[in-house]
Amino acid sequence: MMNTEEKERLQKFMAGAGVASRRRSEEMIAGGRVRVNGRVVREPGFKVGGADRVEVDGLAVRRRNKFDYIMLHKPVGVISSARDDRGRKTVLRLLSRDWEERGLYPVGRLDFDTSGLIVLTNDGAMTYKLTHPRFGVEKTYLAWTPGQAAAGQLRRLAAGVRLEDGVTAPARARTVRLEDNFSLIEITIREGRNRQVRRMLAAVGLETLRLKRIAFGPLALERRLAPGDYRPLRSGEIEALRRATEGRGR
């Protein structure tokens, strides 16, 4: 039997086994869906080890030896979650049945009306590191706004702007292209607040006509990957994701 030092929190064990992300695992625990050695456990901080039997909805949970990772080009009008109570199409419904059955879930979220790169995996530990603010993994977006964005507006975005849930961390912002009726702005952030980029742009007086995520950490959205299409990550890309979180969050 493992000693106390070798045990880990129940939600971390579940994420490492590919059940769900840590946050979702905590919800499942609080909802009474998880048993340890035959009894329901509702405390997310409960410690488990190698000799403990963990069950979710009556099914035994074991750590995976191999995880799956997918790059998907999310179209506008699709929900970035594993399920939706309102019956809207989710990113999982874009996958073939073979992929659907592997317990994948999206890493972070993209708004319903935002398109672009999203990663799906059954690696809960990786999901935690890629989405937790303290790891600071960068996300880059292209935003189409009416008119011409002023240099002062871009400087305010870069310095951080005050939103209703606090001041944003410093970002990078630049104009990629200027047309007669719109500006194309590239903005890179290290946070993942709800509708953050749209709210940041609105805070400096810029309306968002269209928003697309083009990079997540070291991953860049491939031009040949059409909306709704996806592909498995290559081994080098998976390793690059791991390196993106190494030494951070301590």
Image (tube, helix red, strand yellow):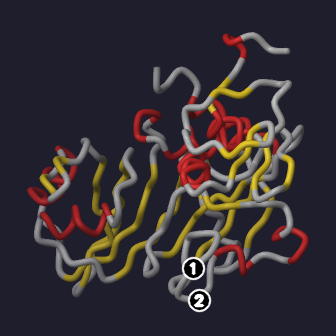
Residue depicted at x 46% and y 79%: 112
Nearer-the-camera pick, 244 or 19: 19
Label 1: how many residues lie within 10 Å, few (<14), some (14-19) or many (20+)? few
Describe residue 60's horizontal placement relative to residue 203 as left or right.
right
- Mark 2 is on which residue type? Gly
Q: Position of residue 210 (x, y in %)?
A: 37, 80
Describe residue 144's horizontal placement relative to residue 27 as left or right.
left
Q: Position of residue 129 (x, y in %)?
A: 56, 38
- Name the quarter where the N terminus is drawn: top right
- Mark 1 is on which residue type? Asp
Nearer-the-camera pick, 159 or 96: 96
Q: Secondary structure at mark 2?
A: loop
Label 2: how many residues lie within 10 Å, few (<14), some (14-19) or many (20+)? few
Q: Position of residue 238 (x, y in %)?
A: 73, 42
Is residue 218 in view? no
Disc 2 and disc 1 in contact, CB within 8 angstroms: yes
Q: Position of residue 23 (x, y in %)?
A: 53, 49
Describe residue 112's horizontal placement relative to residue 175 as left or right.
right
The part of the image, by quadrant, that contains residue 82 is bottom right
- CA–CA distance in space, label 2 to label 1: 5 Å
Residue depicted at x 31% and y 63%: 197
| Total tally of numbered discs in the picture | 2
Residue 84 is labelled as 1
Residue depicted at x 25% and y 81%: 182
Q: Is residue 38 above or below residue 32?
A: above
Residue on which disc 2 sits: 87
Residue depicted at x 67% and y 80%: 228
